[in-house]
Amino acid sequence: MKKTAVIVSVLLILTISMAFAGGQQGGTGQAGEGGTSRYRGTITMYAQGYSPDQPTTTRPNPPTMFRTIAARWEAMHPGITIDFLPNLEAGTDYLTWLRTRIAGGTAPDIFWAQYYDLNTGGIPTGSFYQLNEFLERPNIHISGNTRWLDTFQRALVTQSSGINGEINNINGDYVGTMVVYNVAMFRQAGINFPIVTWSDYTRACQMLINAGITPWAYAFGNAGSAPDYFTWFTRLYATNLYYNDFERLAVRGGRNALSLSPVEVAIGVKNGYFTHEDPRFIGFWANLKDHIDNYMARDSISAAVTNQSILNMFINQQVAIIWNGSWVGNDLRAANVTFEWAGFPFPIPDSSVSPYANDFNSAPAVGGPSAAFQYSISTPRANMTMNNDKLEAVLDWLMFITTPENNAAIVNDVGSFVPTIIGAPQNPANAELVSMLQAEPKVIDIGPLSLGAAAQQAFYREFQIYAQGNQTLEQAGRNIRDVFDRAADEIIARADFDVTPYLNRR
């Protein structure tokens, strides 16, 4: 497989209140005292994509670095073993599995979870520790460090924090996204210009149609992970269209905020920004529907179309373009693709999408801290084996894997994401990505990920009905408003400050 230099540009632009306060939040020992831990036994960890599983027919080359690093840590802590739980069988719903384990008190000591599921109730409140207090400690595995928190990218910590600023997981990687295309098909259609804006993209799609080639496909019909993927479009458009109102929306964070907190999104709903009363809210759906009708593979709004089937269409050269994540290179290599492919950043909205579009490049907003290195610690409510001594050992282990060198070794072992611990060694191609993270780009999510699962599902469902031609934008907007209002009220009720002064400010 050949990859053109264009793919490099993609990499270059890649962005509870504790129910057990008191005895269970702290411990009598200091995390990081290698070899002196009072705990003896096993620490279980569900490491998701980084799990050093045994090779299988479906996963013949699993990563190994986590096991290597665990062996080093175990040598420093005699009597403690890290037990990596294998990845779940294909077709198993992870959240259902995890919630079942939590309900039975058998959750892993360390488990993977998306930050938005932790922040919005997708995973039961009280089943995981808030880590803010622990992050104020020094990471003794990093020479000279005085505060563990300072080793994490501020932009990503802000984006993944909860309603009241709680930090519910340790996050050490960054997922990028891109548009991937078949070079020969682009050449056949005569596409020889850079694709930067949505107008450029639409022009390219029409040229592919004229050449008898189906431009692209996207899994708009299935449930599964499609709602998560659909949020890519939401962040791409919203970050651009609402950019000029960012300071008005960041009512608590203000000018220096990097993203909107869940409660700021909730306030934005109550103030009419994130409702159909604002033409920026779902107006971009019309443009997506136009592409579904004219430029996408048939049956895109079908439950039979999955993310895997879309990838297969590209592999089999049935479509010229797919929108995918930074893991796509591994997927294409595993499929032994022989044709030349390349990629470019998501095309940003312009006047062809909305009169509210501006020159702000919102493509980096589609990436973020939502990859495989997101680890939370289960509380005694979720895990009957958790106690203070084990907690201290778990914290020491998490500190160890978040040194710059270990973070880079684990993340780069998979090659699908980018290590984000400050100082983590990077490949030369990722230099500008690191620079972008340090520049702290702004990200605006207009609701689905910030307001919880019900809001996310409703948003996606109403889009599907609209895209199938079975309702108008106005009807979809009214239906979404009801769900968003309820979700916003729930978020506001959990805020630790009076939101009244921020309401009715438009």
Image: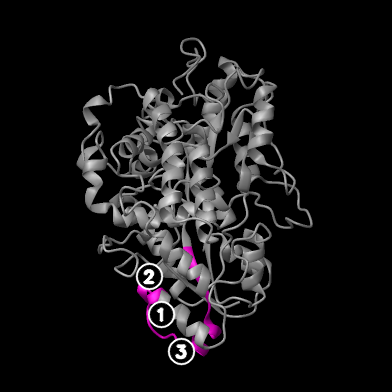
- Towards the viewer: 410 or 233: 233
Of pointers 1 and 2, the one earlier in the residue sequence: 2
User: Which residue does the numbered mark 1 point to in the structure image?
Assistant: 203
Give the percent coordinates (x, y) of residue 64.
Answer: 66, 49
In the rendered image, is residue 480 in sight? yes
Give the percent coordinates (x, y) of residue 11.
Answer: 43, 63
- Towards the viewer: 419 or 339: 339
Residue at position x 47%, y 31% from top?
Answer: 168
Label 3 or label 2, whichever lies nearer to me, is: 2
Disc 1 to disc 2, C-alpha distance: 8 Å
In the rendered image, is residue 417 in sight? no
Under circle 2, the secondary element is helix
Q: Report if residue 193 lies within the magenta region.
A: yes
User: Which residue does the numbered mark 3 point to in the structure image?
Assistant: 190
Disc 3 to disc 2, C-alpha distance: 18 Å
- In-image side of 273 versus 39 (left or right): left
Under circle 3, the secondary element is loop
Around disc 3, counting alpha carbons within 10 Å, would you say few (fewer than 14), some (14 to 19), or many (20 or more)?
few
Residue at position x 56%, y 21% from top?
Answer: 391
Q: Which residues are magenta?
A: 178-201
Q: Quadrant of the N terminus?
A: bottom right
Of pointers 3 and 1, the one earlier in the residue sequence: 3
For residue 82, above or below residue 312: above
Colouring mode (rainbow / by chain / secondary structure / one colour):
one colour
User: Which residue does the numbered mark 2 point to in the structure image?
Assistant: 198
Around disc 2, counting alpha carbons within 10 Å, would you say few (fewer than 14), some (14 to 19), or many (20 or more)?
some
Residue at position x 45%, y 27% from top?
Answer: 131
Q: Report if residue 219 lies within the magenta region.
A: no
- In-image side of 181 versus 203 (left or right): right
The image quarter in which residue 156 lies: top left
Under circle 1, the secondary element is helix
Q: Residue furthest top?
A: 23
